[in-house]
Amino acid sequence: MSTQARATLTAYEPPKRPGQPPGAALGAVTFQFNPSQLALSKSAGWVAHQARSAEQVGVPEFTGALPRRLNVELFLDGTATHDTAVQKGVETLLSWCAPTARSISAKAPCAPRVKFAWGSFASVSFFGYLEDVSATYSLFDTDGTPLRATCTVQLTEAGDPTPRQNPTSGTLTVRRVHRLVSGDSLELLAYREYGDATAWRLIAEANGIDDPQRLRPGTEILVPGADEAGAR
């Protein structure tokens, strides 16, 4: 019997520079109950040109694709434990709308990148940012501690990192995504990908990993192509 996939919302350090991938994972909120519905939207930008002397409408001009937007509800329940888990969960979501400590110290304040993931449902799994978070508390303990909350979040696509170009060949560098499992290490990934365990620093730099000994199973990381390793 297969295990039911749980939906998760994970926050990552924002990219250090435009075009780079997000950094290390900051934390994740796992859905206690998978969502019953998701609202996914995408728009296109157009400019309608008008001509005074024309009887028909002018020819529209396409200005580009607009980002995807995902609206989803996250239900938090603490009636079994009567602790502050619901309050902390809401505070975590709200904190992801503010700049991270690392980005502030780097004098480039930016909120985290956020990614929604639910098993193999790839259409809703993209890096974005939280544009809106609202929480409705519906049950409280005798001391006022919230025990239930429904959080509605709007995640707006931030765009995938642009593949880097190999200056010697003019070809685009391919980077794949690997989901960490128990027992994974950067040295092992480097050996599997490049046949050289000492190339683990390339993976660490691509993901903003400062401590390679603290890898969290379930985290998705970018693995640069073998041509990048060979260029080092």
Image (cartoon, rainbow, N blue to C red):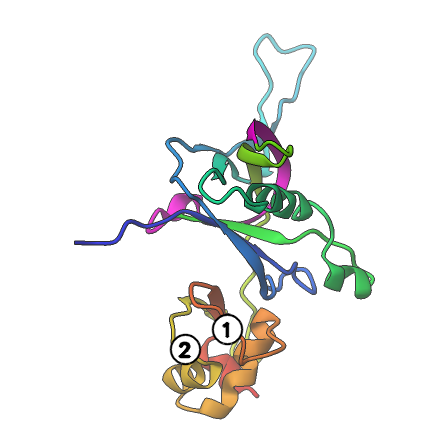
Q: Main secondary structure of the magenta part?
A: strand
Q: Are marks 1 and 2 in contact (CB under 8 Å)?
A: yes
Residue 166 appears at what percent x and percent y?
A: 55, 76
Magenta region includes residue 134: yes
| Disc 1 to disc 2, C-alpha distance | 8 Å
Where is 150 relative to 126, above or below?
above
Residue that sits furthest to the top in the current view: 55
Q: Which residue is mark 1?
A: 215
Question: Magenta includes 210?
Answer: no
Taking the spot 56% from the left edge, 60% from the top edge, the residue there is: 162
Residue at numbered disc 2: 184
Above or below for 106 versus 30:
below
**Residue in view at x 42 percent, y 80 percent:** 189
Of residues 129 and 143, the one drawn nearer to the viewer in this rendering: 143
The magenta span reads 119-140
Above-or-below relation of 162 to 225: above
Observer-nearest residue: 65 or 58? 65
